Image: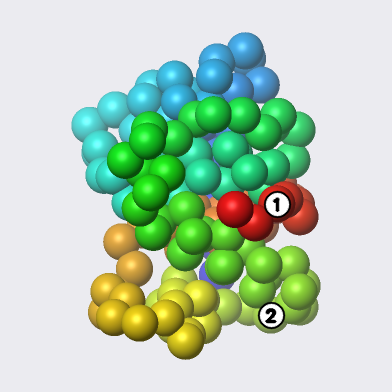
Amino acid sequence: MNISQSGYGIITLNAVKLIRQQFSPTEAWQHAVAGKEKGCPKSAFLGLCQFGWVKDIQPGDYLSSRALKGPNKDYAIRAAQLLLNNPEADYTPHQLWTLSISGLTNPPANHNQQMNVVLALREAGLLIEGITP
């Protein structure tokens, strides 16, 4: 599926490039996303960075306290776990979302680009096993 060539897929990979140029994950996301600011994919990306799920990015405190309490990082981490446990699976964002929220009480009906962030990292070979908060 080439999620890495879509809107938030491109933003995600551009943010990783900026991190490699010495930006913090938070600064990198702000620069990469300019004009397309959405909280859900931002929290998904920063949550994955914060808890060590992105290759070559040191875990750290990247999420705001509000985002840390929110569910988006958890959705992204659940999706990352699914992808890493099923490396041959070729999920669409919707399929991955459905699996990621399975068993949760009252989850949102649709993903809000969080799955595009996770899938883009996987396509680029940047998704690694991190810690689960």
Colouring chosen for the image of the structure: rainbow
Relative side of 61 to 113, left or right:
right
Q: Is residue 67 left or right of residue 22?
A: left
- Residue toward you, 102 or 87: 102
Q: Amino acid at mark 1?
A: Ile
Q: Residue drawn at (63%, 14%), measured in percent from left and top?
A: 21
Q: Is residue 14 left or right of residue 112?
A: right
First reached walking from the N terminus: tag 2 or tag 1 = 2
Please give the label number shown on residue 131. Answer: 1
Residue 36 place in picture, x, y as percent: 25, 38
Q: Mark 2 to mark 1: distance in Å?
A: 22 Å
Count residues near mark 2 (Cα–Cα under 10 Å), then give few for <14, some for 14-19, many for 20+.
few
The image quadrant that residue 101 belongs to is: bottom left
Residue 117 in view: yes
Residue nearest the observer in this picture, 106 or 20: 106
Residue that sits furthest to the top in the current view? 22
Question: What's the residue at 47%, 64% (across, down)?
Answer: 75
Between 62 and 26, the one lying in front of the other is: 62
Residue 62 lies, in percent from the top left, at 50, 30
| The quarter of the displayed image where residue 31 is located | top left
From the viewer's perspective, tell me whether residue 79 is left or right of residue 128: left
Q: Which residue is mark 2?
A: 89
Between disc 2 and disc 1, the foreground one is 1
Q: Residue at x 44, y 20 (%)?
A: 27
**Above or below, comparing residue 30 to residue 126 in the picture:** above
Give the SS element for disc 2: loop
Residue 50, which numbered label? none
Q: Is residue 11 above or below residue 76?
A: above
Residue 19: % across, % down: 60, 23
Report crowding for label 1: few under 14, some 14 to 19, many 20 or more residues within 10 A (C-alpha).
few
